Amino acid sequence: MVSLLSSSSRSPAYDVLPFDAAAIASTIDIDDCTFLLVSSSDKSYSLILEYVAGHLAKDGDHRSFEVDAGKKQRNYWDDSDDEDDDKAKTSTIMAGAGIHRFTWKEHELYCLRQLIGTPVGTQRDAARMENIVLFSTKIHTETTLHSFVDELVAASEATKKGIIKIFRWHVKYEYWRDAEKTRARSIESVILPRDVKLKLTDDVDDFVNEDTKAFYADHGIPYKRSYLFHGVPGTGKTSLIQAMAGQYGRNLYFLQPTHPEMSDDSLRSAVEQVPRNSIIVMEDIDALFGKHREKKVAQSPLTFSGLLNALDGVGGPDGHIVVLTTNFRNQLDDALIRNGRVDVHVAFEHTVPEQMEAMFQAFYPSEDDAKAKVFAEALVAALNGREMSTAALQHYFVTQRRKTACQTIANVGEVVRNIDDRKKQAEEDEKERLEREEEEESDDDDDDDDDDDDDDDKTKAKLKVLIKRVESLERVKDGKTEKKDEDEQ
């Protein structure tokens, strides 16, 4: 019996075997087995290769391995919640090309990873078509193979209480790569004005309600919700996104639309492959297109309409939440953030006294509210109209971690000095940048002048040659004329 697994369907039969039977005949008797084909575009592809590499039937039952040093190992099949153990695994071992014998539960299975055809050039390097064929040496075991694949996918998408997984889209191979997992943080741990957090949590609470889901279905509205987090850098946008994931038990899926190879098709595929009830994050959305839809990333194949279709959830799963972030809302095209495409706008401003008090209490929980209020008043007085982000405030508390609460209050002047120093450094950096640009422009002008001089010299030389040729022709003509006159005489 023959089976097929693709990203969209499973088919029960094949007319032509999708592998070289003769090449694997010494290992597998295909007349007495069941097999399953997995496309490289399927979300299970990399999961299978990772599992196989870690569960070989015995030492030596492999042909090759592949290492991805830029990715932390997922180990979805490991029930351990030890985050430190996960952080120690800084590379992923995957089954390479060839036949691999491995075990799953009480079953002994085979995995054939094959490269098909010759390398095809892409924008950056050469790529080849790939797929996996899974074999069971027992007949009528297609359910076993499907269950194996389904279990890996389910484990990768599952959430554990207190743990969130962060996925990032692999543009080249078009699958969601698990970048890391981290402990969830509570909404309360994010220091924001109370009304800002309530605006968001009240809306999300309403969205995840079963009555809301039924309402969307009854009215034929795509069941999704979109938020725009906008405002000052370092004010908690990313922290709040992570807290949302923990609060509502959802994994995070980060997209990088500015990737030079991110196309409309790739973005659509990314949205389609996101599991139900996930959070999709697109950071710095203003870096893509300007106020009038002009491209800011010239080499990007992504179009404005392709981005809008992705945000509209065309082909996407039910129940997902989309969060866009930007520091510059005024640079966004109105069509990008209109009602229905972005449902709620959440503003992130500079730190206010309420946040100063809350952060003081977070770092000095044994102190009373009165002392927190004194800290906020002292800091506001020291700032004297200056603005600061919550990131800067947190940095101050970290530097004061060995100080008492009273010492931290007395040292608020250090916050001002730090702000002034950073501002001065930023101004100096900007000045140096402008000077470099002026020098480069001046060099370009000099080069242009040199080029002009060279062109003038070349033109003059060419004219001299042409003049000499004309004079030579005239002399020849005169000579011929004189000879002709002599003959006539």
Image: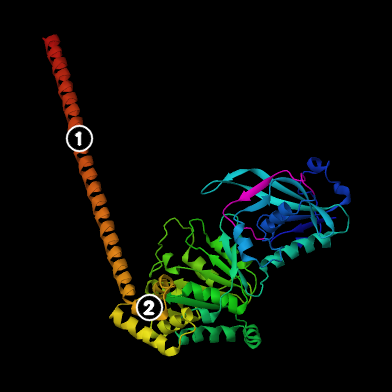
- 166 over 472 or under it: above or below: below
Q: Nearer the viewer, residue 366 or 248?
A: 366
Q: Nearer the viewer, residue 102 or 98?
A: 102
Name the residue rendered at 67%, 65% in the picture.
Answer: 156
Name the residue rendered at 62%, 82% in the picture.
Answer: 220
Q: Secondary structure at mark 1?
A: helix
Circle 1 sits on which residue?
Answer: 459
- Residue 147 on image: x %, y %: 79, 64
Circle 2 sits on which residue?
Answer: 407
Q: Which of the two marks, 2 or 1, is nearer to us in this view? A: 2
- Residue 445 on image: x %, y %: 22, 48
Q: CA distance from mark 2 to mark 1?
A: 78 Å
Give, as a three-letter code, the residue at label 2: Gln
Image quadrant occupied by the N terminus: bottom right
Q: Nearer the viewer, residue 365 or 352?
A: 365
- Which residue range is magenta in the image? 58-74
Number of dots carrying numbers: 2
Q: Work out whether residue 23 can be spotted.
A: yes
Q: Work out whether residue 350 can be spotted.
A: no
- 272 over 479 or under it: above or below: below
**Image-quadrant location for residue 174:** bottom right
In this rendering, position of residue 343 left or right of residue 247: left
- Residue 300 on image: x %, y %: 46, 58
In this rendering, position of residue 31 left or right of residue 242: right
